[in-house]
Image: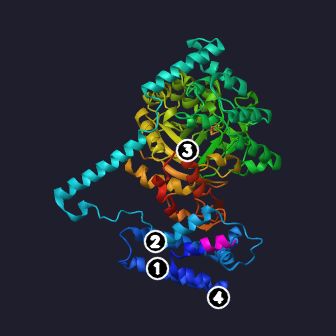
Amino acid sequence: MEKFRQRLLKILDTAPELKAIMISEHPLEMKRKRIKDFLTDRLVSTFSDDPTIEPLEWVVARDAIRAFSAMLSIRNEKLIGHSLLQYMEDLIHGNDSWNLKKPSSGFFSELEHLLRGIIGNTGIYPVKVPAFMKHEGRKAAKLRSSDLSRMSRTAQRFIDRYPCGLDKSAVRRRSINKSRILKHYGATELEWEDWKWHVRHIVKDAETLGSLIKLTNEDYRAVKLAREQRIPFGVTPYYLSLMDYEEDRARDYAVRAQVIPSLNYVENMVSARESSEHSMDFMLERDTSPVEGITRRYPMIAILKPVLTCPQICVYCQRNWEIEDVHSSDAILSNNKLDKAIQWLSDTPEINEVLITGGDPFLLSNRRIEALLSRLSKIRHIQRIRIGTRTPVTVPQRITESLVRTINRFHVPAKREIVLVTHFEHPYEITPQSMAAVQKFKRYGMAVYNQLVYTFYNSRKFEASALRLKLRLIGVTPYYTFNTKGKEETDDFRVPIARLLQEQKEEVRLLPGTVRTDEIVFNVPGLGKNYLRSLQQHDLISILPDGRRVYEFHPWEEKLALADTYVYTDVSIHDYLKRLKAAGEETSHYRTIWYYY
Ligand code: SF4
Protein backbone atom coordinates (compact mmCIF):
# COMPACT_ATOMS: atom_id res chain seq x y z
CA MET A 1 0.00 0.00 0.00
CA GLU A 2 2.98 2.32 0.49
CA LYS A 3 3.36 2.90 -3.25
CA PHE A 4 -0.32 3.86 -3.46
CA ARG A 5 0.11 6.20 -0.52
CA GLN A 6 3.03 7.88 -2.26
CA ARG A 7 1.08 8.18 -5.49
CA LEU A 8 -1.85 9.77 -3.71
CA LEU A 9 0.41 12.25 -1.91
CA LYS A 10 2.01 13.20 -5.20
CA ILE A 11 -1.40 13.89 -6.72
CA LEU A 12 -2.35 15.96 -3.68
CA ASP A 13 0.65 18.19 -4.47
CA THR A 14 -1.66 19.64 -7.14
CA ALA A 15 -3.64 21.29 -4.32
CA PRO A 16 -1.20 21.91 -1.43
CA GLU A 17 -3.90 23.28 0.91
CA LEU A 18 -5.85 20.09 0.50
CA LYS A 19 -2.76 17.99 1.04
CA ALA A 20 -1.97 19.82 4.29
CA ILE A 21 -5.45 19.02 5.57
CA MET A 22 -5.30 15.39 4.52
CA ILE A 23 -1.89 14.60 6.04
CA SER A 24 -2.73 16.35 9.33
CA GLU A 25 -3.59 14.27 12.37
CA HIS A 26 -6.99 15.93 12.86
CA PRO A 27 -10.07 13.75 13.22
CA LEU A 28 -11.85 12.92 9.96
CA GLU A 29 -14.85 15.15 10.60
CA MET A 30 -12.61 18.14 11.20
CA LYS A 31 -10.87 17.39 7.92
CA ARG A 32 -14.22 17.20 6.17
CA LYS A 33 -15.11 20.64 7.53
CA ARG A 34 -11.75 22.14 6.58
CA ILE A 35 -11.93 20.77 3.04
CA LYS A 36 -15.41 22.19 2.69
CA ASP A 37 -14.12 25.58 3.86
CA PHE A 38 -11.27 25.32 1.38
CA LEU A 39 -13.70 24.55 -1.45
CA THR A 40 -15.94 27.45 -0.43
CA ASP A 41 -12.98 29.80 -0.53
CA ARG A 42 -11.99 28.50 -3.96
CA LEU A 43 -15.52 28.98 -5.21
CA VAL A 44 -15.66 32.53 -3.92
CA SER A 45 -12.33 33.34 -5.53
CA THR A 46 -13.39 31.90 -8.90
CA PHE A 47 -16.44 34.16 -8.84
CA SER A 48 -14.33 37.16 -7.78
CA ASP A 49 -12.42 37.13 -11.05
CA ASP A 50 -9.30 35.53 -9.63
CA PRO A 51 -6.44 36.79 -11.87
CA THR A 52 -4.52 33.53 -11.31
CA ILE A 53 -7.24 31.59 -13.16
CA GLU A 54 -7.27 31.62 -16.99
CA PRO A 55 -10.45 32.77 -18.75
CA LEU A 56 -13.07 30.01 -18.80
CA GLU A 57 -11.04 27.88 -16.36
CA TRP A 58 -13.33 29.34 -13.73
CA VAL A 59 -16.28 27.50 -15.27
CA VAL A 60 -14.41 24.21 -15.01
CA ALA A 61 -13.30 25.11 -11.47
CA ARG A 62 -16.86 25.88 -10.42
CA ASP A 63 -18.10 22.52 -11.75
CA ALA A 64 -15.21 20.58 -10.19
CA ILE A 65 -15.78 22.24 -6.80
CA ARG A 66 -19.45 21.38 -7.01
CA ALA A 67 -18.64 17.75 -7.82
CA PHE A 68 -16.09 17.38 -5.04
CA SER A 69 -18.46 18.99 -2.54
CA ALA A 70 -21.12 16.42 -3.42
CA MET A 71 -18.57 13.64 -2.85
CA LEU A 72 -17.97 14.92 0.68
CA SER A 73 -21.64 14.86 1.59
CA ILE A 74 -22.47 12.46 4.42
CA ARG A 75 -25.88 11.90 2.87
CA ASN A 76 -24.28 10.75 -0.36
CA GLU A 77 -21.82 8.54 1.47
CA LYS A 78 -24.71 6.80 3.21
CA LEU A 79 -26.61 6.50 -0.05
CA ILE A 80 -23.86 4.50 -1.75
CA GLY A 81 -22.16 2.96 1.29
CA HIS A 82 -18.77 4.36 0.42
CA SER A 83 -16.81 7.40 1.61
CA LEU A 84 -14.20 8.85 -0.73
CA LEU A 85 -12.84 10.93 2.13
CA GLN A 86 -12.50 7.94 4.45
CA TYR A 87 -10.85 5.98 1.67
CA MET A 88 -8.24 8.69 1.07
CA GLU A 89 -7.72 8.96 4.82
CA ASP A 90 -7.13 5.21 5.10
CA LEU A 91 -4.72 5.25 2.17
CA ILE A 92 -2.68 8.12 3.60
CA HIS A 93 -2.61 7.04 7.21
CA GLY A 94 -2.39 3.33 6.57
CA ASN A 95 -5.63 2.58 8.44
CA ASP A 96 -7.27 -0.71 7.77
CA SER A 97 -4.65 -1.47 5.18
CA TRP A 98 -5.47 -5.20 5.05
CA ASN A 99 -9.07 -4.71 4.06
CA LEU A 100 -8.58 -1.67 1.88
CA LYS A 101 -9.43 -2.10 -1.79
CA LYS A 102 -6.43 -1.31 -3.97
CA PRO A 103 -6.86 1.98 -5.80
CA SER A 104 -6.78 1.61 -9.57
CA SER A 105 -5.03 3.86 -12.09
CA GLY A 106 -8.51 5.06 -13.00
CA PHE A 107 -9.05 6.25 -9.43
CA PHE A 108 -5.84 8.26 -9.44
CA SER A 109 -6.60 9.75 -12.86
CA GLU A 110 -10.04 10.85 -11.68
CA LEU A 111 -8.62 12.42 -8.54
CA GLU A 112 -5.82 14.18 -10.34
CA HIS A 113 -8.14 15.75 -12.91
CA LEU A 114 -10.65 16.69 -10.23
CA LEU A 115 -7.97 18.56 -8.29
CA ARG A 116 -6.64 20.23 -11.42
CA GLY A 117 -10.16 21.40 -12.12
CA ILE A 118 -10.62 22.73 -8.60
CA ILE A 119 -7.49 24.84 -8.65
CA GLY A 120 -8.11 26.08 -12.20
CA ASN A 121 -5.12 24.40 -13.81
CA THR A 122 -6.52 21.95 -16.32
CA GLY A 123 -4.41 23.20 -19.21
CA ILE A 124 -7.25 22.49 -21.64
CA TYR A 125 -7.31 26.01 -23.05
CA PRO A 126 -4.58 27.41 -25.29
CA VAL A 127 -2.43 29.98 -23.53
CA LYS A 128 -2.79 32.46 -26.39
CA VAL A 129 -5.99 34.48 -26.59
CA PRO A 130 -7.55 34.09 -30.09
CA ALA A 131 -6.55 36.96 -32.42
CA PHE A 132 -10.13 38.01 -33.24
CA MET A 133 -10.68 38.96 -29.59
CA LYS A 134 -8.16 41.76 -29.94
CA HIS A 135 -10.02 43.41 -32.86
CA GLU A 136 -13.45 44.71 -33.75
CA GLY A 137 -15.72 44.93 -36.76
CA ARG A 138 -14.88 43.35 -40.12
CA LYS A 139 -11.32 42.52 -39.11
CA ALA A 140 -12.52 40.61 -36.03
CA ALA A 141 -15.16 38.89 -38.16
CA LYS A 142 -12.60 37.76 -40.76
CA LEU A 143 -10.24 36.42 -38.12
CA ARG A 144 -13.10 34.68 -36.36
CA SER A 145 -14.31 33.27 -39.66
CA SER A 146 -10.95 31.72 -40.40
CA ASP A 147 -10.86 30.23 -36.86
CA LEU A 148 -14.29 28.73 -37.47
CA SER A 149 -13.21 27.35 -40.84
CA ARG A 150 -10.27 25.70 -39.14
CA MET A 151 -12.63 24.09 -36.61
CA SER A 152 -14.94 22.95 -39.38
CA ARG A 153 -12.06 21.41 -41.37
CA THR A 154 -10.85 19.56 -38.28
CA ALA A 155 -14.35 18.20 -37.67
CA GLN A 156 -14.65 17.18 -41.32
CA ARG A 157 -11.34 15.33 -41.20
CA PHE A 158 -12.68 13.24 -38.33
CA ILE A 159 -16.05 12.72 -40.01
CA ASP A 160 -14.38 11.58 -43.23
CA ARG A 161 -12.67 8.74 -41.34
CA TYR A 162 -15.96 6.90 -41.02
CA PRO A 163 -17.19 4.89 -43.99
CA CYS A 164 -20.78 5.35 -45.09
CA GLY A 165 -22.86 2.67 -46.75
CA LEU A 166 -23.75 5.13 -49.50
CA ASP A 167 -20.10 5.42 -50.61
CA LYS A 168 -19.67 3.95 -54.08
CA SER A 169 -17.01 1.53 -52.86
CA ALA A 170 -19.32 0.25 -50.09
CA VAL A 171 -22.18 -0.20 -52.57
CA ARG A 172 -19.84 -2.26 -54.78
CA ARG A 173 -18.66 -4.39 -51.87
CA ARG A 174 -22.21 -5.06 -50.73
CA SER A 175 -23.24 -6.09 -54.21
CA ILE A 176 -20.48 -8.73 -54.20
CA ASN A 177 -21.55 -9.82 -50.71
CA LYS A 178 -25.13 -10.16 -51.88
CA SER A 179 -24.08 -12.39 -54.79
CA ARG A 180 -22.09 -14.59 -52.41
CA ILE A 181 -25.07 -14.97 -50.07
CA LEU A 182 -27.52 -15.64 -52.88
CA LYS A 183 -25.16 -18.28 -54.28
CA HIS A 184 -24.92 -19.94 -50.87
CA TYR A 185 -28.71 -20.26 -50.69
CA GLY A 186 -29.22 -20.89 -54.40
CA ALA A 187 -31.63 -17.94 -54.38
CA THR A 188 -32.53 -15.31 -56.95
CA GLU A 189 -32.40 -11.52 -57.07
CA LEU A 190 -36.18 -11.53 -56.90
CA GLU A 191 -36.10 -13.49 -53.67
CA TRP A 192 -33.58 -11.01 -52.26
CA GLU A 193 -36.20 -8.29 -52.72
CA ASP A 194 -38.74 -10.27 -50.70
CA TRP A 195 -38.57 -9.55 -46.95
CA LYS A 196 -40.16 -12.88 -46.14
CA TRP A 197 -37.26 -14.65 -47.85
CA HIS A 198 -34.86 -12.79 -45.55
CA VAL A 199 -36.87 -13.66 -42.46
CA ARG A 200 -36.98 -17.31 -43.52
CA HIS A 201 -33.21 -17.32 -43.99
CA ILE A 202 -32.11 -15.53 -40.83
CA VAL A 203 -28.63 -16.82 -40.03
CA LYS A 204 -28.88 -18.40 -36.59
CA ASP A 205 -25.77 -20.51 -36.17
CA ALA A 206 -22.01 -20.16 -36.14
CA GLU A 207 -21.45 -22.61 -39.01
CA THR A 208 -23.63 -20.76 -41.53
CA LEU A 209 -22.31 -17.41 -40.35
CA GLY A 210 -18.73 -18.68 -40.68
CA SER A 211 -19.38 -19.91 -44.21
CA LEU A 212 -20.63 -16.48 -45.34
CA ILE A 213 -18.12 -14.17 -43.67
CA LYS A 214 -14.79 -14.77 -42.02
CA LEU A 215 -15.01 -15.07 -38.24
CA THR A 216 -12.34 -14.95 -35.59
CA ASN A 217 -12.13 -18.05 -33.40
CA GLU A 218 -13.58 -16.03 -30.56
CA ASP A 219 -16.54 -14.85 -32.67
CA TYR A 220 -17.22 -18.43 -33.67
CA ARG A 221 -17.06 -19.71 -30.10
CA ALA A 222 -19.25 -16.87 -28.83
CA VAL A 223 -22.02 -17.52 -31.37
CA LYS A 224 -21.83 -21.26 -30.78
CA LEU A 225 -22.09 -20.85 -27.02
CA ALA A 226 -24.92 -18.32 -27.41
CA ARG A 227 -26.95 -20.83 -29.40
CA GLU A 228 -26.22 -23.68 -26.99
CA GLN A 229 -27.36 -21.49 -24.11
CA ARG A 230 -30.46 -20.23 -25.95
CA ILE A 231 -29.26 -16.65 -26.00
CA PRO A 232 -31.00 -14.91 -28.88
CA PHE A 233 -28.79 -14.53 -31.91
CA GLY A 234 -29.63 -13.94 -35.55
CA VAL A 235 -28.65 -11.91 -38.60
CA THR A 236 -30.74 -11.31 -41.69
CA PRO A 237 -29.02 -12.10 -45.01
CA TYR A 238 -29.43 -8.42 -45.94
CA TYR A 239 -27.65 -7.20 -42.80
CA LEU A 240 -25.00 -9.85 -43.33
CA SER A 241 -24.33 -8.32 -46.74
CA LEU A 242 -23.35 -5.09 -44.94
CA MET A 243 -20.45 -6.91 -43.31
CA ASP A 244 -17.13 -7.03 -45.08
CA TYR A 245 -15.92 -10.53 -45.81
CA GLU A 246 -12.65 -10.18 -43.90
CA GLU A 247 -12.78 -10.51 -40.13
CA ASP A 248 -10.46 -7.56 -39.41
CA ARG A 249 -13.36 -5.21 -38.53
CA ALA A 250 -11.51 -2.36 -40.19
CA ARG A 251 -14.64 -0.81 -41.69
CA ASP A 252 -17.51 -2.89 -40.42
CA TYR A 253 -16.61 -3.17 -36.75
CA ALA A 254 -19.77 -1.35 -35.61
CA VAL A 255 -21.96 -3.49 -37.88
CA ARG A 256 -20.42 -6.75 -36.69
CA ALA A 257 -20.48 -5.69 -33.03
CA GLN A 258 -24.18 -4.93 -33.37
CA VAL A 259 -25.12 -8.59 -33.77
CA ILE A 260 -22.10 -10.81 -33.17
CA PRO A 261 -21.79 -11.12 -29.41
CA SER A 262 -18.41 -11.18 -27.70
CA LEU A 263 -17.49 -14.23 -25.66
CA ASN A 264 -17.44 -11.99 -22.61
CA TYR A 265 -21.04 -10.98 -23.26
CA VAL A 266 -22.26 -14.54 -23.73
CA GLU A 267 -20.54 -15.76 -20.58
CA ASN A 268 -21.95 -12.84 -18.57
CA MET A 269 -25.41 -13.54 -19.93
CA VAL A 270 -25.16 -17.16 -18.88
CA SER A 271 -24.17 -16.29 -15.32
CA ALA A 272 -26.77 -13.48 -15.11
CA ARG A 273 -29.45 -15.95 -16.11
CA GLU A 274 -28.22 -18.45 -13.58
CA SER A 275 -28.20 -15.91 -10.73
CA SER A 276 -31.61 -14.33 -11.33
CA GLU A 277 -33.69 -13.81 -14.39
CA HIS A 278 -35.12 -10.60 -12.96
CA SER A 279 -31.72 -8.96 -12.59
CA MET A 280 -31.56 -8.71 -16.39
CA ASP A 281 -34.77 -6.71 -16.55
CA PHE A 282 -32.68 -3.60 -16.09
CA MET A 283 -35.45 -1.21 -17.06
CA LEU A 284 -37.81 -2.83 -14.51
CA GLU A 285 -40.36 -3.29 -17.26
CA ARG A 286 -42.18 -5.81 -15.11
CA ASP A 287 -42.85 -3.08 -12.56
CA THR A 288 -44.22 -0.66 -15.13
CA SER A 289 -46.61 -2.92 -16.97
CA PRO A 290 -50.22 -2.44 -15.78
CA VAL A 291 -51.42 -5.16 -18.15
CA GLU A 292 -49.53 -7.63 -20.32
CA GLY A 293 -48.30 -6.04 -23.54
CA ILE A 294 -48.38 -2.50 -22.11
CA THR A 295 -45.62 -0.46 -20.43
CA ARG A 296 -46.30 2.95 -18.93
CA ARG A 297 -43.70 5.33 -17.51
CA TYR A 298 -45.18 8.72 -18.44
CA PRO A 299 -48.52 10.46 -17.97
CA MET A 300 -49.56 10.65 -21.64
CA ILE A 301 -47.62 7.90 -23.39
CA ALA A 302 -47.89 4.13 -23.26
CA ILE A 303 -45.94 1.40 -25.00
CA LEU A 304 -47.77 -1.43 -26.73
CA LYS A 305 -45.73 -4.55 -27.46
CA PRO A 306 -47.60 -6.83 -29.86
CA VAL A 307 -44.52 -8.86 -30.71
CA LEU A 308 -41.50 -9.71 -28.60
CA THR A 309 -38.88 -10.51 -31.15
CA CYS A 310 -36.93 -8.90 -33.96
CA PRO A 311 -35.56 -10.04 -37.34
CA GLN A 312 -32.18 -9.89 -35.64
CA ILE A 313 -31.07 -9.18 -32.12
CA CYS A 314 -28.89 -6.23 -31.11
CA VAL A 315 -26.40 -7.59 -28.61
CA TYR A 316 -27.04 -4.81 -26.07
CA CYS A 317 -30.84 -4.99 -26.34
CA GLN A 318 -32.46 -3.89 -23.08
CA ARG A 319 -35.18 -6.45 -23.68
CA ASN A 320 -32.82 -9.42 -23.92
CA TRP A 321 -34.36 -10.79 -20.73
CA GLU A 322 -37.74 -11.31 -22.40
CA ILE A 323 -36.80 -11.97 -26.03
CA GLU A 324 -36.99 -15.72 -26.42
CA ASP A 325 -35.35 -16.09 -29.77
CA VAL A 326 -34.83 -14.25 -33.01
CA HIS A 327 -38.05 -14.21 -35.05
CA SER A 328 -39.75 -16.90 -32.98
CA SER A 329 -43.35 -17.60 -33.91
CA ASP A 330 -44.58 -17.76 -30.28
CA ALA A 331 -43.35 -14.22 -29.55
CA ILE A 332 -46.56 -12.65 -30.85
CA LEU A 333 -48.98 -11.44 -28.20
CA SER A 334 -52.03 -13.70 -28.23
CA ASN A 335 -55.31 -12.26 -29.51
CA ASN A 336 -56.76 -12.44 -26.05
CA LYS A 337 -53.87 -10.50 -24.50
CA LEU A 338 -53.84 -7.98 -27.34
CA ASP A 339 -57.57 -7.41 -26.81
CA LYS A 340 -56.95 -6.70 -23.13
CA ALA A 341 -54.05 -4.34 -23.89
CA ILE A 342 -56.14 -2.39 -26.40
CA GLN A 343 -59.03 -2.32 -23.96
CA TRP A 344 -56.69 -0.86 -21.34
CA LEU A 345 -55.67 1.89 -23.79
CA SER A 346 -59.29 2.56 -24.54
CA ASP A 347 -60.12 2.77 -20.83
CA THR A 348 -57.24 5.17 -20.12
CA PRO A 349 -58.19 8.52 -21.65
CA GLU A 350 -55.05 10.20 -20.32
CA ILE A 351 -52.97 8.37 -22.92
CA ASN A 352 -52.80 10.30 -26.17
CA GLU A 353 -49.73 8.68 -27.70
CA VAL A 354 -49.01 5.00 -28.21
CA LEU A 355 -45.60 3.63 -29.09
CA ILE A 356 -45.94 0.31 -30.86
CA THR A 357 -42.70 -1.54 -30.37
CA GLY A 358 -41.53 -4.86 -29.00
CA GLY A 359 -39.63 -6.47 -30.60
CA ASP A 360 -40.20 -5.18 -34.07
CA PRO A 361 -43.86 -4.72 -35.02
CA PHE A 362 -43.01 -4.87 -38.72
CA LEU A 363 -42.54 -8.59 -38.30
CA LEU A 364 -46.32 -8.71 -38.26
CA SER A 365 -48.12 -9.15 -41.56
CA ASN A 366 -49.63 -6.12 -43.32
CA ARG A 367 -53.04 -7.49 -42.44
CA ARG A 368 -52.27 -7.60 -38.73
CA ILE A 369 -50.65 -4.16 -38.78
CA GLU A 370 -53.69 -2.75 -40.52
CA ALA A 371 -56.03 -4.39 -38.02
CA LEU A 372 -54.02 -3.06 -35.09
CA LEU A 373 -53.88 0.50 -36.44
CA SER A 374 -57.54 0.36 -37.25
CA ARG A 375 -58.43 -0.58 -33.66
CA LEU A 376 -56.15 2.06 -32.18
CA SER A 377 -57.58 4.67 -34.53
CA LYS A 378 -61.01 4.06 -33.11
CA ILE A 379 -59.80 5.20 -29.70
CA ARG A 380 -60.57 8.90 -29.87
CA HIS A 381 -58.00 10.07 -27.31
CA ILE A 382 -55.05 8.58 -29.21
CA GLN A 383 -53.60 11.40 -31.29
CA ARG A 384 -50.28 9.91 -32.22
CA ILE A 385 -49.07 6.42 -32.98
CA ARG A 386 -45.35 5.94 -33.00
CA ILE A 387 -44.03 2.79 -34.60
CA GLY A 388 -40.61 1.65 -33.43
CA THR A 389 -38.89 -0.48 -36.04
CA ARG A 390 -35.37 -1.29 -37.09
CA THR A 391 -36.43 -2.97 -40.33
CA PRO A 392 -35.21 -0.04 -42.50
CA VAL A 393 -31.77 -1.11 -41.25
CA THR A 394 -32.10 -4.87 -40.82
CA VAL A 395 -34.38 -5.77 -43.72
CA PRO A 396 -35.41 -2.68 -45.70
CA GLN A 397 -37.25 -4.92 -48.17
CA ARG A 398 -39.99 -5.00 -45.50
CA ILE A 399 -40.91 -1.39 -46.28
CA THR A 400 -43.06 -2.11 -49.31
CA GLU A 401 -45.32 0.38 -51.06
CA SER A 402 -48.35 -1.54 -49.85
CA LEU A 403 -47.19 -1.46 -46.21
CA VAL A 404 -46.59 2.28 -46.35
CA ARG A 405 -49.92 2.91 -48.09
CA THR A 406 -51.69 0.81 -45.45
CA ILE A 407 -50.11 2.77 -42.62
CA ASN A 408 -50.67 6.08 -44.31
CA ARG A 409 -54.44 5.55 -44.26
CA PHE A 410 -54.34 6.20 -40.54
CA HIS A 411 -52.13 9.27 -40.79
CA VAL A 412 -54.70 12.04 -40.83
CA PRO A 413 -53.36 15.58 -40.40
CA ALA A 414 -54.94 17.47 -37.50
CA LYS A 415 -56.49 14.26 -36.21
CA ARG A 416 -53.89 11.56 -35.85
CA GLU A 417 -50.22 11.40 -36.64
CA ILE A 418 -48.30 8.25 -37.47
CA VAL A 419 -44.55 8.53 -37.06
CA LEU A 420 -41.74 6.05 -37.56
CA VAL A 421 -38.92 5.73 -35.08
CA THR A 422 -36.03 3.71 -36.35
CA HIS A 423 -32.63 2.76 -35.04
CA PHE A 424 -29.55 3.42 -37.15
CA GLU A 425 -26.33 2.95 -35.22
CA HIS A 426 -23.63 3.79 -37.71
CA PRO A 427 -23.22 5.53 -41.09
CA TYR A 428 -22.00 2.18 -42.47
CA GLU A 429 -25.57 0.92 -41.95
CA ILE A 430 -27.01 3.59 -44.24
CA THR A 431 -27.44 2.11 -47.70
CA PRO A 432 -29.34 3.00 -50.89
CA GLN A 433 -31.93 0.39 -49.78
CA SER A 434 -32.41 1.83 -46.29
CA MET A 435 -32.62 5.33 -47.75
CA ALA A 436 -35.31 4.17 -50.19
CA ALA A 437 -37.25 2.64 -47.27
CA VAL A 438 -37.15 5.93 -45.36
CA GLN A 439 -38.08 7.93 -48.43
CA LYS A 440 -41.26 5.89 -48.93
CA PHE A 441 -42.60 7.18 -45.61
CA LYS A 442 -41.42 10.70 -46.32
CA ARG A 443 -43.22 10.78 -49.64
CA TYR A 444 -46.47 10.12 -47.80
CA GLY A 445 -45.74 12.97 -45.38
CA MET A 446 -44.84 10.81 -42.39
CA ALA A 447 -41.92 11.77 -40.16
CA VAL A 448 -39.05 9.35 -39.52
CA TYR A 449 -36.92 9.72 -36.39
CA ASN A 450 -33.85 7.92 -35.16
CA GLN A 451 -32.98 6.60 -31.73
CA LEU A 452 -29.29 6.06 -31.35
CA VAL A 453 -27.82 3.90 -28.63
CA TYR A 454 -24.43 5.38 -27.84
CA THR A 455 -22.05 2.45 -27.52
CA PHE A 456 -18.32 1.92 -27.55
CA TYR A 457 -18.67 1.08 -31.25
CA ASN A 458 -19.99 4.46 -32.37
CA SER A 459 -18.40 6.70 -29.76
CA ARG A 460 -15.16 7.74 -31.43
CA LYS A 461 -14.57 11.41 -32.07
CA PHE A 462 -17.27 12.75 -34.45
CA GLU A 463 -18.45 9.20 -35.28
CA ALA A 464 -22.03 9.77 -34.11
CA SER A 465 -21.95 13.22 -35.74
CA ALA A 466 -21.08 11.54 -39.04
CA LEU A 467 -24.19 9.40 -38.58
CA ARG A 468 -26.44 12.37 -37.73
CA LEU A 469 -25.28 14.31 -40.80
CA LYS A 470 -26.03 11.39 -43.12
CA LEU A 471 -29.33 10.62 -41.43
CA ARG A 472 -30.61 14.12 -42.08
CA LEU A 473 -29.59 13.82 -45.71
CA ILE A 474 -31.66 10.66 -46.18
CA GLY A 475 -34.67 12.15 -44.39
CA VAL A 476 -34.30 10.91 -40.81
CA THR A 477 -34.41 13.29 -37.84
CA PRO A 478 -32.11 12.42 -34.91
CA TYR A 479 -34.41 12.11 -31.89
CA TYR A 480 -32.77 10.50 -28.85
CA THR A 481 -29.27 9.33 -28.06
CA PHE A 482 -29.38 6.78 -25.26
CA ASN A 483 -26.66 6.00 -22.82
CA THR A 484 -26.09 2.23 -22.86
CA LYS A 485 -27.76 0.55 -19.94
CA GLY A 486 -25.85 -0.47 -16.88
CA LYS A 487 -26.15 -4.18 -17.32
CA GLU A 488 -22.96 -6.07 -16.62
CA GLU A 489 -23.36 -8.40 -19.56
CA THR A 490 -23.27 -5.39 -21.89
CA ASP A 491 -20.10 -3.87 -20.42
CA ASP A 492 -18.36 -4.19 -23.79
CA PHE A 493 -20.79 -1.62 -25.16
CA ARG A 494 -20.92 0.85 -22.31
CA VAL A 495 -19.50 4.34 -22.60
CA PRO A 496 -18.94 6.71 -19.65
CA ILE A 497 -21.57 9.39 -19.25
CA ALA A 498 -18.75 11.95 -19.42
CA ARG A 499 -18.06 10.90 -23.02
CA LEU A 500 -21.68 11.54 -24.01
CA LEU A 501 -21.52 14.98 -22.42
CA GLN A 502 -18.21 15.70 -24.11
CA GLU A 503 -19.56 14.56 -27.47
CA GLN A 504 -22.51 16.92 -27.17
CA LYS A 505 -20.40 19.90 -26.21
CA GLU A 506 -17.36 19.52 -28.42
CA GLU A 507 -18.68 17.68 -31.46
CA VAL A 508 -22.45 17.91 -31.84
CA ARG A 509 -22.41 21.64 -31.03
CA LEU A 510 -20.45 22.26 -34.21
CA LEU A 511 -23.24 20.83 -36.39
CA PRO A 512 -26.11 22.91 -37.78
CA GLY A 513 -29.20 23.04 -35.55
CA THR A 514 -31.20 21.07 -38.12
CA VAL A 515 -28.87 18.12 -37.55
CA ARG A 516 -28.27 18.23 -33.80
CA THR A 517 -31.92 17.64 -33.01
CA ASP A 518 -31.46 14.73 -30.63
CA GLU A 519 -31.47 14.78 -26.86
CA ILE A 520 -29.00 12.72 -24.86
CA VAL A 521 -30.77 10.69 -22.23
CA PHE A 522 -30.20 8.18 -19.49
CA ASN A 523 -33.13 5.83 -19.13
CA VAL A 524 -33.71 5.54 -15.39
CA PRO A 525 -34.96 2.03 -14.59
CA GLY A 526 -38.64 2.02 -13.77
CA LEU A 527 -38.89 5.79 -14.16
CA GLY A 528 -37.92 6.89 -17.63
CA LYS A 529 -35.69 9.37 -19.38
CA ASN A 530 -33.33 11.68 -17.56
CA TYR A 531 -31.96 14.56 -19.61
CA LEU A 532 -28.21 14.29 -19.25
CA ARG A 533 -27.50 17.81 -20.44
CA SER A 534 -29.29 19.24 -17.45
CA LEU A 535 -26.96 19.36 -14.47
CA GLN A 536 -30.07 19.82 -12.37
CA GLN A 537 -31.13 16.27 -13.15
CA HIS A 538 -28.10 14.37 -11.93
CA ASP A 539 -25.17 14.66 -9.53
CA LEU A 540 -21.78 13.02 -9.52
CA ILE A 541 -21.52 11.81 -5.92
CA SER A 542 -18.42 9.65 -5.64
CA ILE A 543 -15.44 7.97 -7.23
CA LEU A 544 -14.85 4.33 -6.31
CA PRO A 545 -11.41 2.77 -5.76
CA ASP A 546 -11.71 1.07 -9.16
CA GLY A 547 -12.08 4.48 -10.82
CA ARG A 548 -15.78 4.25 -11.58
CA ARG A 549 -17.95 7.28 -10.95
CA VAL A 550 -21.18 7.04 -9.02
CA TYR A 551 -24.07 9.27 -10.06
CA GLU A 552 -27.40 10.02 -8.50
CA PHE A 553 -30.13 10.51 -11.09
CA HIS A 554 -33.26 12.43 -10.32
CA PRO A 555 -36.59 11.24 -11.70
CA TRP A 556 -38.27 13.29 -14.40
CA GLU A 557 -41.00 14.13 -11.86
CA GLU A 558 -38.50 16.17 -9.87
CA LYS A 559 -40.27 19.23 -8.47
CA LEU A 560 -43.62 17.82 -9.62
CA ALA A 561 -44.10 14.82 -7.37
CA LEU A 562 -42.25 12.55 -4.99
CA ALA A 563 -40.31 9.65 -6.49
CA ASP A 564 -37.09 7.84 -5.69
CA THR A 565 -33.75 8.93 -7.03
CA TYR A 566 -31.56 6.33 -8.70
CA VAL A 567 -27.93 5.60 -7.92
CA TYR A 568 -25.85 4.47 -10.88
CA THR A 569 -22.25 3.29 -11.12
CA ASP A 570 -20.73 4.16 -14.46
CA VAL A 571 -17.93 2.47 -16.38
CA SER A 572 -14.46 3.88 -15.70
CA ILE A 573 -13.22 6.68 -17.96
CA HIS A 574 -9.69 5.33 -17.63
CA ASP A 575 -10.74 1.88 -18.89
CA TYR A 576 -12.74 3.42 -21.71
CA LEU A 577 -9.75 5.46 -22.88
CA LYS A 578 -7.59 2.36 -22.70
CA ARG A 579 -9.98 0.54 -24.98
CA LEU A 580 -10.04 3.46 -27.39
CA LYS A 581 -6.26 3.44 -27.47
CA ALA A 582 -6.22 -0.28 -28.16
CA ALA A 583 -8.62 0.41 -31.03
CA GLY A 584 -6.07 2.82 -32.53
CA GLU A 585 -7.45 6.09 -31.21
CA GLU A 586 -5.27 9.00 -30.16
CA THR A 587 -6.47 9.51 -26.58
CA SER A 588 -5.27 13.13 -26.46
CA HIS A 589 -8.30 13.91 -28.65
CA TYR A 590 -10.44 12.98 -25.66
CA ARG A 591 -8.39 14.69 -22.94
CA THR A 592 -11.17 16.99 -21.70
CA ILE A 593 -13.44 14.04 -20.89
CA TRP A 594 -12.46 14.19 -17.21
CA TYR A 595 -14.01 17.62 -16.83
CA TYR A 596 -17.52 16.55 -17.69
CA TYR A 597 -19.62 15.68 -14.69
S1 SF4 B 1 -34.16 -3.56 -32.63
FE1 SF4 B 1 -34.60 -2.84 -30.53
S2 SF4 B 1 -35.90 -4.44 -29.60
FE2 SF4 B 1 -34.92 -5.33 -31.45
S3 SF4 B 1 -33.09 -6.31 -30.70
FE3 SF4 B 1 -32.49 -4.25 -31.32
S4 SF4 B 1 -32.63 -3.03 -29.47
FE4 SF4 B 1 -33.77 -4.93 -29.08
Q: Secondary structure at mark 3?
A: loop
Instruction: Give the camera-side residue of 588 and 405.
Output: 588
The residue carrying mark 4 is 26
The residue carrying mark 2 is 61
Tell me the distance, in whole angstroms, between the alpha carbons under discs 1 and 3.
Answer: 39 Å
The residue carrying mark 1 is 42
Mark with earlier residue (3, 4) = 4
**Looking at the image, is mark 1 or mark 4 nearer the viewer?**
4
Tell me the distance, in whole angstroms, between the alpha carbons under discs 1 and 4.
Answer: 22 Å
The residue carrying mark 3 is 583
Q: Position of residue 434 (x, y in %)?
A: 50, 28
* Residue 3 is inside the magenta segment: yes
Residue at the spot x=61%, y=57% of the render? 572
Tell me the distance, in whole angstroms, between the alpha carbons under discs 3 and 4.
Answer: 47 Å
**Residue 566's image quarter?**
bottom right
Three-letter amino acid code at disc 3? Ala
Highlighted range, magenta: 1-7
**Looking at the image, is mark 2 or mark 4 nearer the viewer?**
4
